[in-house]
Image (spheres, rainbow, N blue to C red):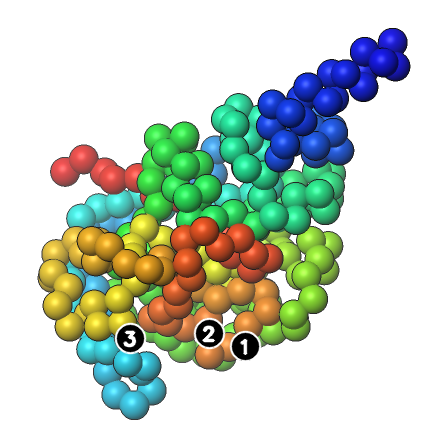
Amino acid sequence: MMRILQLLIVLCVLCDPLLVPAQLERLKKFKHAGSVVTDTPMIEIPAGEFLMGLDGVQALEDERPAHRIWLDTVAIDQYEVTTTQYAEFINTVKRELPWQWEAVEPSRHGDRPVIGVSWHDAEAYCRWKDKRLPTEAEWEKAARGTDGRFYPWGNQAPTNQRANFALGARFSYDHVLSPVQSHPQGASPFGLHHMAGNVYEWVQDWYAIDYYDSSPDRNPSGPVQGQFKVVRGGSWSDLPKYLLTYGRFKLPPDTRNSYTGFRCARSIAQ
């Protein structure tokens, strides 16, 4: 019996070296953790204009100029995608496991945002859910509303009640990531949680430092190509200046780290 078990393990690893035995067992734990995996509620962001970016010396070069754009109606996940939800995905679809996945304990971390996923991983998950990543403009409107506020909750400085931020650089699922439904005081005008802090979020767009100079004024979706993808929102390790609703950041799309996750969007038929 032991020799058969060893052979099965070897064959499994040969078929997919990314799924080592301990990780296979971890996937089984998610399947039998006793919690029901449900879809994240989606919030409809109505069509209309909003102010994107910022003018003046406070804005960085890639955040200027402030410009009004029109966006069609879109639905966006109220919460960041969790480890439990992502586990359902990798239990179903053959995919490279997230970085740091061996540290995930389903009973304790199932409601934490998934981290260690690349842009390609995030995009694949959204497609699997019949969704997509939000565009950068859609993300900013969902976080900022239509009044040009600096943070999702308004213009007041971040506090621990409003956001999960400024926790240093040492990662731990237990100590730095907050449940995705936490911090309701920091929700955006549309009711989305953690649009500032917890984890940066991948969006659809390629990054260009001067994109605002030439972006269309209706449903912009970013440059057609690039070296980096945009991430938004700041993370558990960042200072308040990185949590601004108009702040733009970039990462190579293959990046997997401890401070970047995502949420999904869906177009609404007009």
Instruction: Name the residue at 24% across, 78% down.
Output: 64
Instruction: Name the residue at 77% across, 16% down.
Output: 7
**Amino acid marked by disc 1:** Leu
Which residue is tagged 3? 63
Q: Position of residue 115 (x, y in %)?
A: 57, 50
First in sequence: mark 2 vs mark 3? 3
Instruction: Name the residue at 33% across, 65% down.
Output: 144
Whether residue 29 is visible to the viewer of this picture, yes or no, is no
User: Where is residue 44, by image quadrant?
Assistant: top left
User: Residue most toward the right?
Assistant: 2
- Classify mark 2: helix, strand or loop: helix
Which residue is tagged 2? 242
Whether residue 156 is visible to the viewer of this picture, yes or no, is yes
| Picture layout, residue 80 above or below residue 150 | above
Quarter of the picture holding the C terminus: top left
**Amino acid marked by disc 2:** Tyr
**Cβ–Cβ under 8 Å for marks 2 and 1:** yes
First in sequence: mark 3 vs mark 1? 3
Which residue is tagged 1? 239
**Amino acid marked by disc 3:** Glu
Q: Position of residue 21 (x, y in %)?
A: 74, 29
